[in-house]
Amino acid sequence: MSRKRTAVLISGRGSNMGALISAAMEPTYPAEIALVVSNRPDAKGLERAAEFGIPTAVVDHTGFAGDREAFEKSVDAVLKEHRIELVALAGFMRILTPYLVNAWSGRMINIHPALLPSFKGLATHERALDEGVKLHGATVHFVSAEMDDGPIIVQGAVPVLDNDTPDTLAARVLEVEHRIYPKALELVAIGKTKVTGARVLTGGDGDASLQLVWPG
Ligand code: GRF
């Protein structure tokens, strides 16, 4: 089995990156984390990746004077240089232009800390509490031109408790993120994700566990 060469794009602490690296340490996992790219030279996740012996690269967006496409061309060049086949965005805090989205269409996935299509954008946990939802969670989806949009691959749900603060809720969601991201990358890497219109079919006929993760 050839493992899909996967790059993880980060901007910060990289805990989801860590979850993907851990999963990929299993020899039978169908993807290998072949590269970690950050747009911030000081991203904590870079040190973590290096500790695991994973090649890292920095493409500092501040060097592109607001030219998003030029920044993305540099990112794309690094991905090509490392013969990357799949890209996993993990807390990568840049809004993408159609350039990179189209270049990696069907091969780029993202994790978002909410049950999409609810709560796109930032401050998802605060907004979930403000809205009084009882169920919250995280989503891994293919990246499309719209931010936090695109066909959904896996979701993980957690309860919202009466005494939750944004921080306690974030921590509960993060645990589920670390479970669903490796699962989603696995499904994509083995080619189990068939996009039909807005839906991703993963062969979960009668087996929802392929697409939905509950706590516990
Ligand atoms: C996660 O909550 C992820 O869902 C969001 O950004 C955060 C990144 O956290 N896109 P980490 O860097 O993976 O720890």
Image (spheres, rainbow, N blue to C red):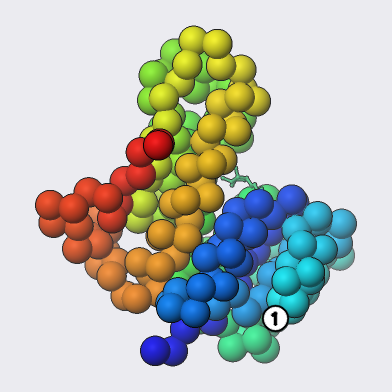
Q: Residues within 10 Å of mark 1 (few under 14, many from 20)?
A: some
Residue type at tag 1: Val
Q: Secondary structure at mark 1?
A: helix
Toward the viewer: 128 or 162? 162
State the residue in front, 53 or 200: 53
Mark 1 CB lies closer than 8 A to ligand 1: no
Is residue 193 toward the left or the right of residue 183 in the image?
left
Residue drawn at 13 percent across, 56 percent down:
205
Where does residue 18 sit, x and y in percent of width and height? 64, 59
Q: Is residue 103 visible?
A: no
Q: Which residue corresponds to the image point at 79% horizontal and 69% vertical from the top-left? A: 51
Q: Which residue is mark 1?
A: 78
Examine the rendered structure and indicate whether residue 119 appears above or below residue 109.
Answer: above
Find residue 56 and report its horizontal and vertical position in percent: 76, 74
Tell me if residue 66 comes above or below residue 5 in the rendering: above
Relative vertical location of residue 6 with respect to residue 118 in this rendering, above or below: below
Q: Quadrant of the N terminus?
A: bottom left
* Residue 114 shows in this picture: yes
Q: Residue at x 48, y 67 (%)?
A: 108
Spot occupied by residue 169 in the image (x, y as percentages of width and height) = 56, 26
Quarter of the figure with residue 136: top left
Q: Residue furthest top?
A: 162
| Relative height, residue 185 to residue 199 (above, below) | below
**76 lies left or right of 184:** right
* Residue depicted at 47% across the width and 51% down the height: 179
Q: Is residue 17 left or right of residue 206?
A: right
Give residue 144's quadrant in the image. bottom left
Horizontal and vertical percent position of residue 99: 56, 69
